[in-house]
Image (cartoon, rainbow, N blue to C red):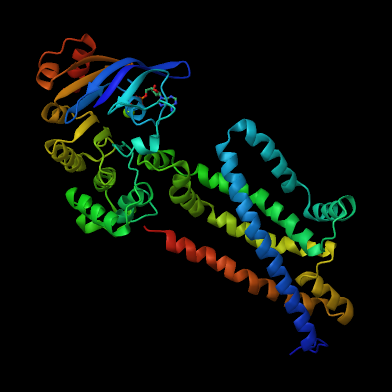
Amino acid sequence: MIEIENVRKSFGPLEVLKGINLTVAKGEVLTVIGGSASGKSTLLTCINGLEPIDSGRILVDGVEVHAKSTDLNRLRQKIGIVFQQWNAFPHLTVLENVMLAQLKVQKRSRAEAEAEAVRQLNHVGLAEKLSVYPSRLSGGQQQRMAIARALAMSPDYMLFDEVTSALDPQLVGEVLDTLRMLASEGMTMICVTHEMKFAREVSDRVAFFHKGVMAEIAPPEQLFGAPRDPELQTFLAATH
Amino acid sequence: MFDTALTANDLILLARGAGMTLVVTAISVFFGTILGIVFGVLRYQVGPWWAAPMTFVLDIFRSIPLLIQLVLANAFVTTVLGWRVSGFSVACGVLSLYTAAYCSEIVRGGIEAVPQTLRRAARSLGMTWGQDMRHIALPLATRVALPSWIGLALGVMKDSALVYIVQVVELLKSTQILITRLQEPLFLLMICGLFYFVISFPIARLGGYLEKRWSHD
Ligand SMILES: Nc1ncnc2c1ncn2[C@@H]1O[C@H](COP(=O)(O)OP(=O)(O)OP(=O)(O)O)[C@@H](O)[C@H]1O
Ligand SMILES: [Mg+2]
């Protein structure tokens, strides 16, 4: 379970998260929508401790992320994250990309790591690309590789930050299909997305962020069907 | 083809000089690169307050002519500290620091060129700062920095000619000794240049080889 309690976060004078309260249960798929600069990415990077927070707290399975005593490198193995930018390590092959953290962080044997990498790459449909370098992959393939790389750590949670928004339109589908597959397998997920159709389909709940505040959170039928927050109404009107 | 008084023994003298140039260069580039990586990473990592004094000290090594550094360092070590060290050690020490000063700049630039997003991705997989450096940041920085580093290594090889000032007989000094004796400057300088070329060429080629190996496009 991810528990976010009254989290505030500023970059200098700019308050980006203004007291966020949110609980994501095991197995839940939460999508986060909202305008640019509303704090969506920042929230995700706070959850895995890449960014510090100013006040409040975030608990992942009861462990306080920003407590001094928390071993972040260990906690992060539980929380996979995939970013908007394609973050393939360009000097490693696809297989090596997916093996590296398994070898160095989890200290798995080469054989184990390779077997797991092959399994995950198979899962996201990249079985044919094992020995290829990332520069030879399309954006969609790179994103699927990044997903496999995160999944190979056997995380309990997956965070996705607009993983399709840097892709050509015809490649969006294959990545969304991968996310749908994960959702159907019961993975606990937080997906920041601009794909409203996708959000409607896969989410258990949808959260709408506006200027650092979670203005509304509800199951998709309700949030899309009968939005109450006026900003959300404007936002939805603009995206349809 | 030439009418020359150059003997086989003289050639051996030149080869010894070339060997000395190679050894001084190799040692200096080796230690200078290690130090350069340490300083480069530190300067990137510690923040402006600590980086500023470090940069200042390194700038001293970069801006004072090497010849002056050698003479001063030699005088300082032998007379002020009273150590009994060879000119060779002084030469290697000074050239290593000189190399480190330039190398740290190259390393810092290389690390800065690695996209921050890649390093975040590495950390978010649970990698420590050190693992990120070792497996992601430095390998990628190396690819960026390689051409400048090759340039530096070749430059140090040529600059190493200045160590004659602390009584180290390297290639150029050996050549000068022969010129004084045989009075055939042009011919001898040509041979000297050839020696320099022969020992530089592999380093220059190494760059091309690695660049090719590392490009996966
Ligand atoms: N490292 C940083 N330093 C300073 N300001 C930052 C930093 N990261 C984000 N910000 C600022 O914080 C605000 C919120 O950014 P964030 O990336 O969380 O928004 P977002 O909701 O993800 O937007 P988008 O939909 O454009 O991705 C923005 O104004 C951004 O400029
Ligand atoms: Mg964002």
**Could you tell me residue B30's position as x and y percent?**
63, 60
Task: Where is residue A189? Give x, y as percent.
Answer: 21, 32
Quadrant for the N terminus of chain A in the image: top left
Is residue A37 visible in the rendered image? The answer is no
Q: Is residue A43 above or below residue B1?
A: above
Q: Which residue sits at x=24%, y=56%?
A: A115
Measured from the top left, where is residue A6 in percent x and y?
A: 33, 15
**Front residue of this view, candidates A47 and B196:** A47
B22 vs A87, left or right, is right
> Can the viewer see residue B41 in this picture?
yes
- The residue closer to the viewer here, B90 or A222, is B90
Choose between B128 and B138: the one closer to the eye: B128
Number of numbered callouts drawn: 0
Residue A126 location, x and y as percent? 21, 53
Picture quadrant of residue B168: bottom right
Ligand 2 lies in quarter: top left
In the figure, residue A151 lies in which quadrant?
top left
Residue drawn at x 65%, y 55% as measured from the top left: B32
Name the quarter where the C terminus of chain A is drawn. top left
The residue under the point 74% across, 62% down is B160
* Relative height, residue A8 to residue A27 (above, below): above
In the rendered view, does B212 fall on the left or right side of A237? right
Tell me: residue A222, above or below residue A43.
above
* For residue B99, side relative to residue A13 (left or right): right
B195 vs B154: above or below: below
